[in-house]
């Protein structure tokens, strides 16, 4: 997560249930306030506990239900003050509520569940499933390269979760190892997709009239079409990621402060006059390909450069390889699936449903307990799978994300990056 670490102040509650209900009506909460509690206040319903994490725009705290004693994770997001268009993170109310809109109808074993939410002390409080197993990123950095069996166990859950999101009209737009949590410590059989701060739900009425254009996400995981701008709006002379992101998003001057955030200075959900090229849910499938590469490489990304502009140009060009020693023990099928997902042209990129049918995904485990996270090894017996010839890394011509004076070292995206 990012670097927001201020504590939640013990402020007076804002109004009573009737006032909250009126506020919900006035500000047009998603689905007319569905899952929004107005019968009691947040502090009457839950006891605040210890911090669980911080993000660029929010913080997460442990909460306990006063009625049942059950524990949950509560994401706390500051709302704009009365009379202000945006909060201290330059996020508008509409943009903030898009996360609620994306989560409301979701019910899948590989997607975090939203129980309910409150407006409290000028903040939006999302009460969600508690996932004490930690981030998948931590497990990858601790264990190193996953065996193909273990990588497949994780990747199948990711594909099924993302396929479900897309069928529900939701594009996540920030899929990464940090946003995959384990329901239980060390148990890779129960993975959840979390953090819908950049998610966009397309309702039937606006799928054609309101395409996604906001440049957002974490650079190493971003798809080429998210980064790319229309030719008439190519950016020149950017010296770092924040300036590049600000120019790509059309948000004006970059946000002041240290370049240590995983997210560009654009409000989540696409608010604020973004000017990038239109793109679709296929951007999530690219991120899935990056995640599979990281699982099998032990956290070494396919696209890496100390200069952020050069990194983004490399992504737009789609240039990556399996040349490192860690890939010598990886099957051709696994590499082929990665190549099917890391295709620059989103129309040619495989979607999640097709990826689930890939021969590598249909392989049987090499042993009843699966492979060790510390060892390589794929099933050498049993069913023979037809091999699809590996496609070469996709190339893209004519990219002009010019850079000048790039910094020598990259910021620690998300406070962690891909290596510690």
Image (spheres, rainbow, N blue to C red):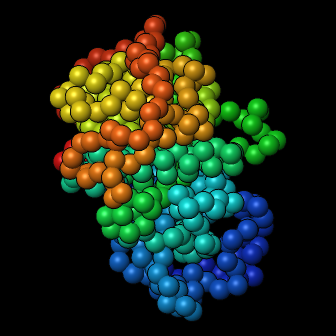
Image quadrant in which you'd find residue 328 = top left
Which residue is more in the foreground, 244 or 185? 185
User: Height in image: 83 above or below 213?
Assistant: below
Q: Residue 203's spot in the image, x, y percent?
A: 76, 46
User: Height in image: 168 above or below 320?
Assistant: below
Left or right of 321? Residue 44 is right
Q: Residue 95's spot in the image, x, y percent?
A: 60, 50
Left or right of 218? Residue 410 is left
Q: Residue furthest right?
A: 205
Which residue is more in the foreground, 95 or 69? 69
Q: Residue furthest front?
A: 382
User: Height in image: 375 above or below 229?
Assistant: below
Q: Residue 67's spot in the image, x, y percent?
A: 57, 92
Figure quadrant of the N terminus: bottom left
Look at the image and tell me whether residue 409 can be seen: yes
Left or right of 141? Residue 232 is right
């Amino acid at each position: 997560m990012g670097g927001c670490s201020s504590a939640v102040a013990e402020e007076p509650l804002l109004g009573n249930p009737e006032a909250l209900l009126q506020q919900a009506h006035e500000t047009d909460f998603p689905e007319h306030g569905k899952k929004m509690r107005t019968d009691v206040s947040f502090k009457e319903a839950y006891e605040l506990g210890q911090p669980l994490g911080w993000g660029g725009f929010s913080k997460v705290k442990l909460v306990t239900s006063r009625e049942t004693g059950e524990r949950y994770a509560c994401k706390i997001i500051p709302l704009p003050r009365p009379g202000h268009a945006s909060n201290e993170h330059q996020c508008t109310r509409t943009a903030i509520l898009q996360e609620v809109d994306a989560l409301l109808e979701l019910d899948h074993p590989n997607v975090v569940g939203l129980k309910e939410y409150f407006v409290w002390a000028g903040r939006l409080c999302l009460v969600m499933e508690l996932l004490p197993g930690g981030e998948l990123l931590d497990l990858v950095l601790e264990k190193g390269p996953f065996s193909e069996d273990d990588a497949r166990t994780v990747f199948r859950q990711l594909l099924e979760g993302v396929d479900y999101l897309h069928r529900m009209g939701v594009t996540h737009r920030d899929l990464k190892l940090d946003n995959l949590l384990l329901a239980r410590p060390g148990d890779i059989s129960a993975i959840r997709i979390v953090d819908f701060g950049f998610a966009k739900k397309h309702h039937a009425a606006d799928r054609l009239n309101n395409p996604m254009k906001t440049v957002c996400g974490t650079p190493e995981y971003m798809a080429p079409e998210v980064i790319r701008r229309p030719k008439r709006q190519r950016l020149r002379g950017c010296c770092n990621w924040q300036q590049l992101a600000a120019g790509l998003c059309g948000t004006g001057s970059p946000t002041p402060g240290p370049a240590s955030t995983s997210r560009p200075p654009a409000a989540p959900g696409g608010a604020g006059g973004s000017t990038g090229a239109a793109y679709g849910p296929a951007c999530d499938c690219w991120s899935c390909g990056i995640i599979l590469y990281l699982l099998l490489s032990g956290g070494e990304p396919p696209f890496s450069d100390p200069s952020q502009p050069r990194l983004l140009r490399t992504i737009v060009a789609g240039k990556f390889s399996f040349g490192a020693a860690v890939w010598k023990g990886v099957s051709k099928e696994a590499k082929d699936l990665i190549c099917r997902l890391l295709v620059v042209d989103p129309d040619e990129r495989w979607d999640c449903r097709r990826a689930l049918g890939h021969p590598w995904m249909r392989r049987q485990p090499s042993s009843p307990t699966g492979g060790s996270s510390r060892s390589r090894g794929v099933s050498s017996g049993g069913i023979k799978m037809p091999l699809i010839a590996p496609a070469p890394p996709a190339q893209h011509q004519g990219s002009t994300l010019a850079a000048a004076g790039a910094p020598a070292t990259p910021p620690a995206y998300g406070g962690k990056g891909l290596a510690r």
